[in-house]
Amino acid sequence: MKTIKYTLLFVGLMLFLVAPAVPAAVTKGPIETMKPVLADLTKLLNDQQLHGDAHKEERRKKIMSTIKSGFDFQEMCKRVLGRTWRDINKAQREHFTELMTKLLENAYIGKLEDYHYKSIEYVDQIIQGDRAQVTTLVNKDDVKLPVHYILQLTPKGWMVYDINIEGVSLVRNYMEQFRSILRTDSFDGLIKIIENKNRTFEKTSKGS
Amino acid sequence: MKRILFLFLLIVLPLGKDIAWAAQNHGVSVNLLDDDYLDENSYQQGSISDPLEPLNRVFFQFNDKFYFWVLKPVNEGYSAVVSPDIRQCFGNFFNNLASPISFLNNVLQGRFKDAWTVVSRFFINTTLGVYGFGDPATTEFNITSKPADFGQTLGVWGIGEGIYICLPIFGPSSVRDSIGLTADFATHPTNYMNWNFTERSAYYMGNRINSMSLAPNVYEELIKYSLDPYIAARQAFHEYRQEKINKHKNTEE
């Protein structure tokens, strides 16, 4: 009689312990979140039908849409501006995020399209509270380049907000540049500088 | 009593959250999460002090002109004439000859296993690799290089980098790295070959142009991606060097 009682108690306790774990398992971990995004990106980059200048706009749109599903540009912009983010209004934040996203697209997507890597290997994952780091090895010509992604847990799940290669952080590099610019220019001055930079990119791509 | 203990364990053990799992270590494990640069207080540690900024910017401009007026044209001419394979051989030769520097600094940093690797590579590449022009140590034996320099050694010893100095011709540096650079020049084998200043400069420039021809256009890409190339270069230099030190500070053998 007593054995049955304790067995039931044991089973009850186990169910009680397992139940809260189920919703936690539903939120995908950092690597599990990144895998489909990077897989889709690799597929797009290798898609022969999207190669060449003729398909550039369509290709860029698809690439950016895939990247945005895993990369939180607004969080990135918040960190890049630091203190200044708190001093600007919602409209300015949205405008800045739009410009910054365009800048990163102009600066890096072209390079990404030309960097014909073979595969991405996931080697490490560290979670500390609501932040995580995923380490990957990008395999190109038998050289494995370690690329670290820094993620934050948002209501939409884990989202990347920084990329770190050989110790150099993308976000911190721009943060330093903006800090220097904001020392002598106002926020509007910074906006103008980014707009000019984007225009330069558009000019060079049209000319090529 | 036993039952209470049993139930207690049942409750406590499965509640372990935030388990960090590290897969196979490819020598790339590093924890970047300890430094959250959203925190304004930890901000200053993320950048290098630059009280000489106006002067450094002048040198940066000089280096920019030096790159576009001298280095780039010479590099383009050189790359057009000499095939990539041969340039790779020259690169191997230069790296092999600099082995004593890597060896010495690996020892000074306590990386004895890596120091032995440098010795092995030197012998393999000098013999099988024909005076260092080949690199069978990497291609045949998978013994990868373990570079080390004196600036890195000083950092591993805990010496701070000091202020940022943008050196003419040599590029981004710091007080610590400039001392390191001087020490590296002093310990380079060419120092003991009775070469005069011109010959040594020619060797340095030859090495520099050759490396440039093999590496991607780092400087031009930096200008392309950044809004303030001077700051971008300074920050990238600081973080890159810091990573080289942190990697070996935490894995003391």
Image (tube, rainbow, N blue to C red):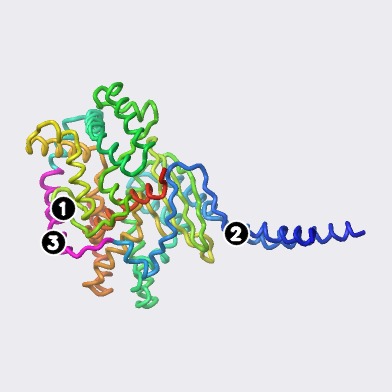
Q: Residue B109's x, y, as percent?
A: 33, 44
Same chain? Circles 3 and 2: yes
Amino acid carrying label 1: it is Leu
Look at the picture and state if B137 lies above or below A12: above
Amino acid carrying label 3: it is Leu
Measure the C-alpha gap from mark 3 to mark 2: 52 Å
Measure the C-alpha gap from mark 1 to mark 3: 10 Å
Q: Which disc number belongs to residue A110?
A: none
- Residue pointed to by mark 3: B55
N-term mark: 1 or 3: 3
Identify which residue, A7 or A43, lies in the foreground: A7
Q: Residue B178's x, y, as percent?
A: 19, 51
Q: Residue at x 29, y 63 (%)?
A: A176
N-term mark: 1 or 2: 2
Identify which residue, B107 or B26, lies in the foreground: B107
Q: Residue at x 23, y 32 (%)?
A: B97
Q: Which disc number belongs to residue B17?
A: 2
Look at the picture and state if A157 lies above or below B89: below
| The magenta stretch spans residue B196 | no
Amino acid carrying label 2: it is Lys
Q: Which disc number belongs to residue B167?
A: 1
Q: Which residues are magenta?
A: B48-72
Q: How many marks?
A: 3
N-term mark: 3 or 2: 2
Q: Residue at x 16, y 59 (%)?
A: B56
**Is B251 on the left or on the right of B204, as rendered?**
right
**Is A165 on the left or on the right of B50, as rendered?**
right
Asked if the residues shown at circle 3 and circle 2 are in contact, with their CB atoms under 8 angstroms apart, the answer is: no
Characterize the magenta stretch by its predominant secondary structure. Answer: helix
Q: Is label 3 in a helix, a strand or a loop? A: helix
Q: Is label 2 in a helix, a strand or a loop? A: loop
